[in-house]
Image (cartoon, rainbow, N blue to C red):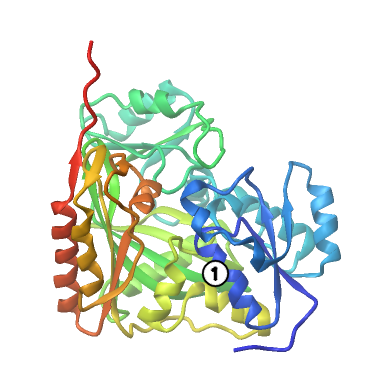
Amino acid sequence: MTSSPTSRVAVIVDPFSSGAQYAPEFAAFGIDSVAVSSLPEVPAAYADSWDATRYRELLAFDGDLEPLVGRLRALDPLCVLAGAESGVELADRLAERLLPEQANPPALSSARRDKGAMARALNAAGVPTIRQICTDDRAAVQAWIDREGLADSDLVVKPPKSGSTDGVTRVPAGADWRVPFDAQLGRINQWHNLNDRMMVQEYARGTEYVVDTFSHEGRHGVADICRYGKIDNGEQMAVYESLTWVSPTEPDVPALSDYAAAVLDAVGLRNGAAHIEIMLTDGGPRLIEINCRPHGGGHPAFNLTATGDSQLHRAVRWFARAEAPPADYRLERHMTVVFLIARRSGTVSGTAVLDGIEELESYHRSAVKLSDGDRIEVTVDLLGTLTLGFVVLAHEDRAQVDRDAAAVRAMEAALVITPDPVPAR
């Protein structure tokens, strides 16, 4: 699809990962994109998604907002969108200055990025949450644990402004939560944010889902719902194993959709894409976190195959021609993403076994990056998962997808990982 060109531009802040898909989609409507970087460099895990040739202009934020606002204003922006998690806060600030009619409420900006502020916003709006505290004070954490009766319960410790499960640690009942708390506090995380406080939460049990949305003028639409498969990998919790698209006819979908809308309202997300991770517990849905940007890992492109649409494509159509998106979605093909997992660190061999992936009946795409002789680290977070790679399976038959997912796991199990030699004393 092409349209007549316009002089206005789409401003994409940190157009990495799925955010890289904005520029070609806007180009189909004759709209150029401008890239704004909030980071000193593209994160290594997202380097493959970065293509400078897609953008009319490349701009960098050096801490001084005024020159950046001035240059962007001269380019007549059509919209300001966050491409990746690192760009959420800067996109908020730029939208407020450049396009106030599109801007989300500035007073709730921190709730759209900082998990501590996020929880406070939900509590203020009466939206049920996981029990949690965000502080740099160990005594306050211990008092909270005692007050909530969590001394003999599993806990989760994580930074409030990290992403991709960076720094997320499960603390088994009876173990010392202070160890991961102290190890992360004061550290600069992989998103270049200082961990000046830490979150401590009760460990929520249930089934984890992600609800992907696009909102315009306060109206929220669900573009897809997926079910996560996550496992504990040694001492690391919440390592991604799989992601499976959920039919809109499944019985849990209405509750998840309604809860997601309540979360969006609570944090003031009136315009833009969001990626909302929700644990469906025995007590109902509970927010893990909301990310006010598109679902990463190339998800919007995969979602086109699964549902015929995506949150990113809805956003482009809205800003390009004011096409109001639907409130819900349909499932056209069953789809699962299988994430490879390294159970230990070492040198990998036997990768020829992975050649069989493309022969699978439901094979859709592979992003596996392993070769014999590669040195790999035990998988501890999403960026580590993306470094190893993943396989996307899609088919009209759910059972075929399940069989092929099991086949991928069998290939993974056949890989040989030789541990590093122990240094001589």
Across and down, in percent, residue 251 comes to: 25, 75
Q: Residue furthest top?
A: 425
Across and down, in percent, residue 42 comes to: 57, 49
- Relative horizontal placement of residue 48, taking residue 66 as reference (left or right): left
Q: How many marks?
A: 1
The quadrant holding residue 155 is top left
The quadrant holding residue 241 is bottom left
- Relative horizontal placement of residue 56, taking residue 180 as reference (left or right): right
Name the foreground residue: 37 vs 103. Answer: 37
Tell me if residue 420 can be seen.
Answer: yes
Mark 1: which secondary structure? Answer: helix
Name the foreground residue: 91 vs 351. Answer: 351
The quadrant holding residue 149 is top left
Name the foreground residue: 9 vs 258. Answer: 9
Give the answer, above or below, for where 374 lies relative to 101: above
Name the foreground residue: 236 vs 219. Answer: 236
Instruction: Residue at 46% x, 71% y: name it.
Output: 300
Tell me if residue 125 can be seen.
Answer: no
- Give the quarter of the figure containing the N terminus: bottom right
Residue bearing mark 1? 21
- Give the quarter of the figure containing the C terminus: top left
Across and down, in percent, residue 311 comes to: 50, 73
Q: Residues within 10 Å of mark 1 (few under 14, many from 20)?
A: many
Across and down, in percent, residue 79 comes to: 70, 69
- Relative horizontal placement of residue 146, taking residue 12 as reference (left or right): left
Which amino acid does the dot numbered 1 rest on?
Answer: Gln
Instruction: Residue at 36% x, 58% y: name it.
Output: 278
Instruction: Residue at 21% x, 58% y: name it.
Output: 352
